[in-house]
Image (cartoon, grey):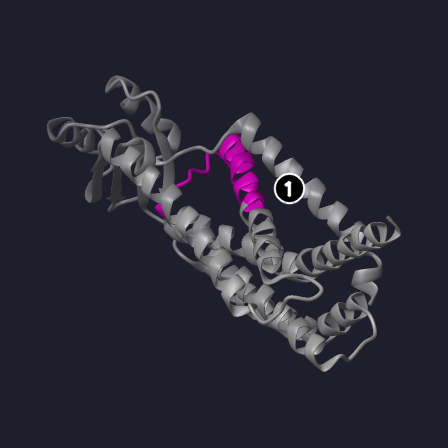
Amino acid sequence: MFIIKNKFVFLTISAFIVLGSIVAILVYGLRLGIDFKGGTLLEVNYTNGRPETSLIAPVLASHKISDAIVQNVGESGLSIKSSPLLDTERVVLVNDLSLGGKYPLTQTTFNSIGPSVGHELTQKAIVAIIIVVIAIVLYIAFAFRGVSEPVSSWKYGFIAIATLVHDVAIPSGVFALLGHFHGAEVDTLFVVALLTVLGISVSDTIVVFDRIRENLKNRIAPTFSETVGRSLNQTFVRSINTSLTVILVLLSLYLFGPSTTKNFALVLIVGMFFGTYSSIFVASPLLVIVEQSQAKKALKHKKK
């Protein structure tokens, strides 16, 4: 019952974090990668030692590439993300990156995406997230169709969506900050990570909701809020342990995995943490608030 008794404290914490995330997104925006805005990804591997990044800047300037993002990959690789390059431009650039032959290299990756393709991917990503959200509402409304008192099944669905907005907004806000201060970009892996977070988070929420439904049928407590509190006590350890084991795996991927999956792992870590938080400290308290609001309205109606 500790969580339910202090529900406004936990909801206030969530509200401040979500508000901060939204402000970060509005102020800084999300730094789109070439998957969405179009551009070129070029990766090379130096065979006898990699030059300092400061030596690469003049080469890019000579090719009139001013918006490039240069990152070290592994011990000897170099990644350059820039505006679209023609194949002939790419050949000359790769040759110049050897700095006159002082740093022999081989090209390992070259991907080019046009602006129209990037725009199409952006639209598909938005549509995918919307479809997932609608499907979740419909599924929960159907799965909980036997629950009508004191909170209808549709309200369970919309409360789940409110928690999902919480779970998506926070990782997005984190990446808005990382994009502004550290150049982190949003790519298709970011969208995949968000969709994964949505699935895992709603799974946790449904586990809690399902226990509440069973306990309501069994009438284990005299009031709805007490039933929710006991249901949380019964599922709390399971939710924490499940999420903790996944987060530990993701931490190892982030710390020891390849650089190409670090952002993916980071989104999942942040999303898993706050997804578990929302399932326990946001979704269930919101159910209690909705039930209490309905009870107050019913009482006023009777008095009239």
Residue 175: x and y in percent read 52, 40
Q: Is residue 259 visible?
A: no
Q: Is residue 130 visible?
A: yes
- Relative vertical location of residue 35 with respect to residue 67 in this rendering, above or below: below
Q: Which residue occupies the foreground of this view, 232 or 13?
A: 232
Residue shown at 35% from the left, 46% from the top = 188
Residue shown at 65% from the left, 78% from the top = 214
Q: Which residue lies furthest to the front in this view?
A: 304
- Relative vertical location of residue 224 with respect to residue 42 in this rendering, above or below: below
- Relative vertical location of residue 276 with respect to residue 171 in this rendering, above or below: below
Residue shown at 33% from the left, 36% from the top = 36
- The residue at which mark 1 appears reads as 18
Label 1 residue SS: helix
Q: Residues within 10 Å of mark 1 (few under 14, many from 20)?
A: many
The residue segment tinted magenta is: 169-188
Q: In this view, does 85 lie to the left or right of 149?
A: left
Q: Is residue 292 left or right of residue 273?
A: right
